[in-house]
Image (cartoon, rainbow, N blue to C red):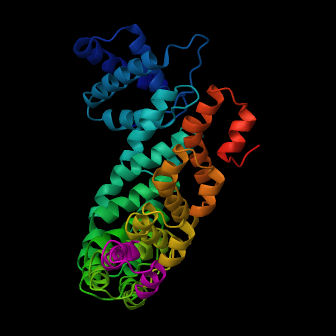
Amino acid sequence: MPITSYAQLDKRCMDVTKILRLELNLDAKDHVFLQTLLQVENSAETPMLPSPRSTNHPKCLCRALADDLVKIKNLHDAILAAPPDMGPQLLAVFDKTLRRTCHQDSPLLALSIAQARVMNGEGCFKVAKEHGITDGLILCGLQLSAAMGPAVKAIASGQACHVIAQELEIRHDGPLLALEMLAIKGPAGDCLRRGESCLTVAKAYGIFQPEALLALQLLAVEGAAGESVKRGTPCQEVASAFGIDKNNAQLALQLLAVDGPAGECVKQGQSCRGVADKYGIIFQKALLALQMVAVNGPAGEDISKGKSCHEVIETYGIDLREARLAVQMLAVSGPAGAGVNEGQSCRKISESYGIDLPEAQLELQMLAVEGTAGRRARQGESCRIIADEFALSDVQAIIALEMISVQDVAAARVINGESCRAGRRRAGYYGD
């Protein structure tokens, strides 16, 4: 029999309060809470929802939430224990009342209810609207709960991410990315491991976020695509076959080639330029890695035998500045440096060994300063004459030579009574 008046509801409510009093030991305030929860007008055919309560002295949010959750649990248990003909209507009113909990009035309670609803599969924005939740961060949190909750089962069943996102109203980039990463770790990743194209898999599973697409393609690089490169298939051909178009994923493919077949060709003496063309290596980081294989291998061996840097660089197709500098620094620490230590001019040595980069030339000149040129400065020879003979052109090298003289010869002359200006002039300093 339907309840049509407050009097009828009040009688039923008293039955419930008896149950509460006997079984759950609630106090008088809890009974009022129950009656307020189930409040109706006399003319109503079904229970009506109560108006939101207001208070001039709100409780601490955490304590209020704890109290509300206890009341809700106890009331729910009591309603379930109510007479059979009364239970469904009480539950309906109970449900509607919870759905009307306003975030502004009871923020923690409203958030708890909203999160529970979202975890149960309701749309995030629909739930947020009904609870008056407008804060962007909270909305994002609800969507993340949906992505890590009901969406997991949907992903496992093979549903596309964009379909799930539409049903659960997941719209923010962060939760969408979490959703798509779940697909990559699950069925989408399984498809890649079977050798399917990233583009095909991304379309089938609704993967559109840039970070997720990159993760998908890197997974292919770690799997079938990478294995193809290791077998010697050119990188660009593999990238096209597996739908790999993100720069970082293509770079990862090319670095695999450098560590594999392309690097082996260079170690055998082939030109880096030709090997790069053969294996489709075009990114500068991968090209540099390939050229450094040559520097640390056959190119370095030729330098140690006394060959010119220009000749070696041309032979092995080493054209990137960092790799060229590495070749010249090998010469400086090898035969070129030995020539300077024997007293030869840095300019002559640089021309002979093809050392033309400023960093390598400075290193060569500093060898001279630390060696023969420095010893002559300590013996009292003019820094200007020494610098000219050794062709010291870098300011840092000249200053280093003068500092050696200051520490020994010029300082001794000043101590013996010469003026600083005279001491500097006799030492052949460049500065005033």
Residue drawn where x is 37% and y is 74% of the image? 295
Q: Is residue 163 visible?
A: no
Q: Which residues are magenta?
A: 289-316
Residue drawn where x is 42% and y is 40% of the image? 115
Near-viewer residue (253 or 215): 253
The residue at the far right in this view is 432
Does residue 362 sit above or below 108 in this rendering? Answer: below
The total number of labels drawn is: 0
The residue at the far top in this view is 28
Q: Main secondary structure of the magenta part?
A: helix
Q: Is residue 25 visible?
A: yes
Does residue 308 sit above or below 216 in this rendering? Answer: below
Decide whether residue 310 is among the magenta residues: yes
Q: Position of residue 173 (x, y in %)?
A: 51, 56
Residue drawn where x is 53% and y is 27% of the image? 50
Near-viewer residue (429 or 418): 418
Q: Quadrant of the C terminus?
A: top right
Quarter residue 109 falls in: top left
**Apparent side of residue 186 relative to residue 424 in the rendered image (left or right):** left
Decide whether residue 369 is among the magenta residues: no
Q: Position of residue 247 (x, y in %)?
A: 47, 73
Q: Quadrant of the N terminus?
A: top left
Q: Position of residue 81 (x, y in %)?
A: 24, 27
